[in-house]
Amino acid sequence: MTELIAPELVVLDASLGSSPADVIRHLAGLVADAGRATEVEGLFADAYAREQKTATGVPGGIAIPHCRSAAVTEPSLAMARLSETVDFGAKDGNADLVFFIAAPEGADQEHLKLLAKLARSLIKKDFTAALRAAATREDVVALVNDALGLGPAGATTAAAGAGAAAQVGLANAASGGHKRIVAVTACPTGIAHTYMAADSLVAAGKEKGIDVQVETQGSAGSTPLPQSVINAADAVVFAVDVDVRDKERFAGKPYVQSPVKRGIDEPGVMLDEALKIAADPSGRRVAAAAGGSSSASASGSDRAESGGAKLKRVLLTGVSYMIPFVAGGGLLIALGFLLGGYDITKYADTIVLKNNLFNLPAEFGPQAWGPLGAYLGAVLFKIGALSMGFLVPALAGYMGYALADRPGIAPGFVAGAVAGFMGAGFLGGIVGGLLAGYTAHWLASLPAPRWLRGLMPVAIIPLLASIVASGLMFVVLGGPIAWITTWLNTQLTGMSGAAAVTLGIILGLMMCFDLGGPVNKVAYAFAVAGLSAASADNAAPYHIMAAVMAAGMVPPLAMALATVLDHKNFNATEHENGKAAWLLGASFISEGAIPFAAADPLRVIPASMLGGAITGALSMAFGAGSKAPHGGIFVFFAIDNFVMWVISIAVGVVVTALATIGLKRYVGKKAPQAAEAVPVAA
């Protein structure tokens, strides 16, 4: 089995930058330079995306960025002991020890178990103290191998202790005097946080005299807790960022649920909360067959999530599941227009239903691509239109899922379909999804006899929640929301001149404010929602879509240009990110500018908003239109007035790049980290 760590993967007493992105980028470079990854950028992107989901800093000055990546060819550990600490999001301060865990997408179980064991070792103070005192990189490698049981001193210990941490308390489970808690830990990657949270909970239980037994649902495999142990437990702790597998096993048990990182940071507090809920007859209980949500379930994390944060999470969940329908459907519609012309909207049903390849309607007229092109255009247009028809139901359905897990999906889809039927559109979908989700969540919280619990999530809750949410939409809310939607569409359709330019400015500002965040997504969803109402006689939605897509392309393209124009004010990591940002920006992926904004938000974001506003205004003023909801420069065939649209983007990119350079040079000037020359201790 290949060694996980080697001296060339260790950096001692070095300054690798001021942000997690800088450190992760450098360590990803070490892995690639050692021949353990095919590319730096792909590995960095996967690791940094994981870091943005949940910060990987843990108590004790430690950070464990990690990921699975197709770029990794061999499971690897890269370690940095930093001379200048970096904030990885731990509550007790910055990290000086950073372990980067890089696993291939298909890592074998033996390697994954070793990676999990390393994560567990990092919460042991004697191990981390030895790492801080190590004189050479070879010493670090020896310490890690001993901790993994790969060194001469550690082999016996590892064999004896494998898996013990998560099962501490089994011998004492029969004792009647102690409280008993079972726990489940899980994180998206399933390599580090899953096992560290398990050990932290076990250790906290020892200190408090509580028998704690943990089921780790991670990459190294999962051994389910015996049902008898679950039945004997006083309460359950879910420290998870993803769904709990087979959650119905814990039905009826008092529980507390929080993100997995809280299980590392505050294990004792979570145990106390679980026992407190267990002592409260009206405290929350695990519902039968209601799976956990991927964002730490609303039912279990109300305590730690504000109302605004919860609403944002719910809306973003709905939008994220909606976008694939929109992107695929919109591109298919654009291809339908390309092959069949704009009149395809009138004749697609007739052509497709009658399979009229050689007998097109006479009034359809000759087509540039001939009868075959017209027929294929009609088929593609119809598939795209049907896909776009799921826009509002998918939005509402997955908002319901974010609030109530699986029982909320069906009521949300139905409420979204009702919103579409009544003409309430995007706004109606949001209201319908919230109604369905909150109703399903409330029904799931009601006590039910054991014989009925199995039917609750699959029949009773979807039925009653659909009646309530869709009934309110039909009887009370649908009409007023439809009126508002119609009024808004009328106003937007009638916009011209200065009013249209003003709308372009607003949309451009929104697209560049948070680079893929909630404000960006609201502007994008508003644009794509209008495409279904667009036609040759109503081109305003096409203009809005073009302005939104153009403005969203500005930040990454501008950062790429800025790194070319001003080499000195960007470090080596940012120059590498700038190379990737050319393609990301051209593809309409605003997130390509996030590494720059994260490192310098007070300069990058205002400059991006300035350029985005200019681009949005110019796109509207030039009358550019996009029949495709995504794709950037690569859907040129679906862009009306393409040359002027490109000019709009170019002007915004130049303005943002120059503004960023000016702000970096003259406003609170700060020298960039010189990542090109990193001192490494021998």
Image (spheres, rainbow, N blue to C red):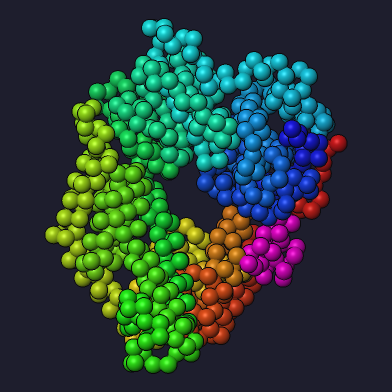
The residue that appears at 72% across and 19% down in the rendered structure is: 155
Query: Can the viewer see residue 255 in this picture?
Result: no
Q: Farthest left residue? A: 475
- Where residue 38 appears, x then y in whole percent? 73, 52
- Where residue 258 appears, x then y in whole percent? 43, 35
Residue 157's quadrant in the figure?
top right
What secondary structure do most residues of the magenta stretch adopt? helix
- Where residue 473 appears, x then y in whole percent? 19, 59
Residue 330's quadrant in the figure?
bottom left
Q: Is residue 301 left or right of residue 55?
A: left
Q: What stretch is highlighted in magenta?
A: 560-583
The residue that appears at 82% across and 31% down in the rendered structure is: 138
The residue that appears at 41% across and 56% down in the rendered structure is: 321
- Where residue 288 appears, x then y in whole percent? 30, 32
Give 278 or 2, whichever is nearer the viewer.
Answer: 2
Q: Is residue 379 left or right of residue 465?
A: right
Magenta highlight on residue 255: no
Magenta highlight on residue 580: yes
Give 174 or 562, whichever is nearer the viewer.
Answer: 174
Is residue 484 placed above or below 371 in the rendered structure? above
State which quarter of the image contains the N terminus: top right
Give 263 or 149, whichever is nearer the viewer.
Answer: 149
